Image (spheres, rainbow, N blue to C red):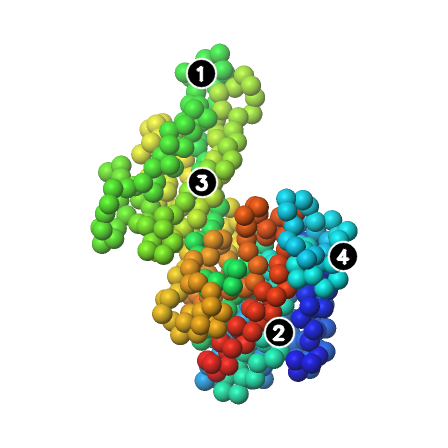
Amino acid sequence: MSATFDLAEFHRRAVETDSTESVDEMRTVLLETLDAADVAASVDDLGNVVATRGAADHEAAASADTHLVFNTHIDTVPPHVPYERRTERPGDEAVDGSEDAGEGDVVCGRGSCDAKGPLAALLDAFLTVDPDDGAVTLAVSIDEETTQTGGAHLAETIDADGYIVGEPTGLDVCTAAKGQFEGTVTIHGESAHAADPGSGLNAIRAAAPILQAMESYDEREARSASEGPSGDDGEPRGPDDHETLGRPILTPSMVEGGEATNQVPAECTITFDRRSVPPETSDAFCADLEAHLRQWLPDAMDLDVALIRPDTPFPEAFATDPDAELVRTLQEASGGTVRPFEAATEASYFAQQAPTVVFGPGVLTDEVGAVAHSKREYVRLSDVRTAARAVRETVERLL
């Protein structure tokens, strides 16, 4: 089966395929590649691509002695960056598709590392491994960069004993990541004429102490975890520092309010980004933050805290046991460091089911600056091959 799959050619075709606005063409590329390798694949109700080896399908694979899932995504962030192949990684310049180094090891372009490099590695391992005593499922999602409904759906519908999620980790084995969700704090006052501000309740003015209170939400003196979050005594309510992920982060990112220059604003909205650590969940966070902020609000005013896109999933914080067999086996095969992942990822949905690691070629940043999502996105093709070998060896040891 390996003779039908050319990793470098697939990676080139994938990076050349624009999947910033629609994944339809990229999904076709993936399905055609699986079909050429005589692997049956299906597209689920949300558009995810699912294929299984070692069992009739992923449902039958759940009954296998060991079932492993490879997950990554085919969508990319805009704008599309054209494919290039170089001998050296790019500096601070934008990739424009003008270079052609033929057999150079550095591949540039949108998705080269996030996440079409990891996709090529996982696909190579999937097609070349021989799952004699178990099953392997390739489950590729379609909206990781936006709403993540695809990854959440895959986690709900595919049972497995372990999950390898492809993202650019520099070939390190990542066992934990902070959660990420977004929301708003809306302060409700009362409008009035700016010539008589005392007759109203200025929501923008009230935002100043609320912003200070947001800064103090996670601040605390040393406290044992058994004491739990603080209550209504003015102390912080956020979770304690996590042994692997450290402190949670709460970042006000936008402020909006007022309708006219000569009017006391009746409403002010602060948008925030939350990077959570266990055991905090997005469901509990809003109520806890609201209770904390109310202590800093004038009695005559009101506020509420709500999630943005409450009907779509948010990646929760997760932490897999570093001593899990999947972690140890992949680390031995890759030689990488066991560490947390820097960004939120769909791995959080799978981690609720079984041991989950994030692994793949490429990096989010290097000494020059941003790599993934940037104008200079690149990956080393040799690292893509190394990742494929490490995943294949891991599966062969575990199945």
Q: Position of residue 61 (x, y in %)?
A: 52, 81
Q: What residue is shown with label 1?
A: 197
Q: Which mark is residue 100?
A: 4
Q: Earlier in the sequence, mark 3 or mark 2?
A: 2
Q: What residue is shown with label 3?
A: 251
Alpha-carbon span between mark 2 and mark 1: 67 Å
Residue at 26%, 44% in the rendered image: 230
Against 218, residue 6 (above or below) is below
Q: Position of residue 111 (x, y in %)?
A: 64, 57
Q: What residue is shown with label 2?
A: 124
Q: Earlier in the sequence, mark 4 or mark 3?
A: 4
Alpha-carbon span between mark 4 and mark 3: 42 Å
Q: Residues within 10 Å of mark 3 (few under 14, many from 20)?
A: some
Residues 35 and 105: in front is: 105
Q: Nearer the viewer, mark 1 or mark 4?
A: 4
Residues 99 and 258: in front is: 99
Q: Earlier in the sequence, mark 2 or mark 4?
A: 4
Q: Is residue 71 left or right of residue 175?
A: right
Residues 70 and 95: in front is: 95
Alpha-carbon span between mark 3 and mark 2: 39 Å
Q: Nearer the viewer, mark 2 or mark 1?
A: 2
Residue type beneath disc 3: Thr
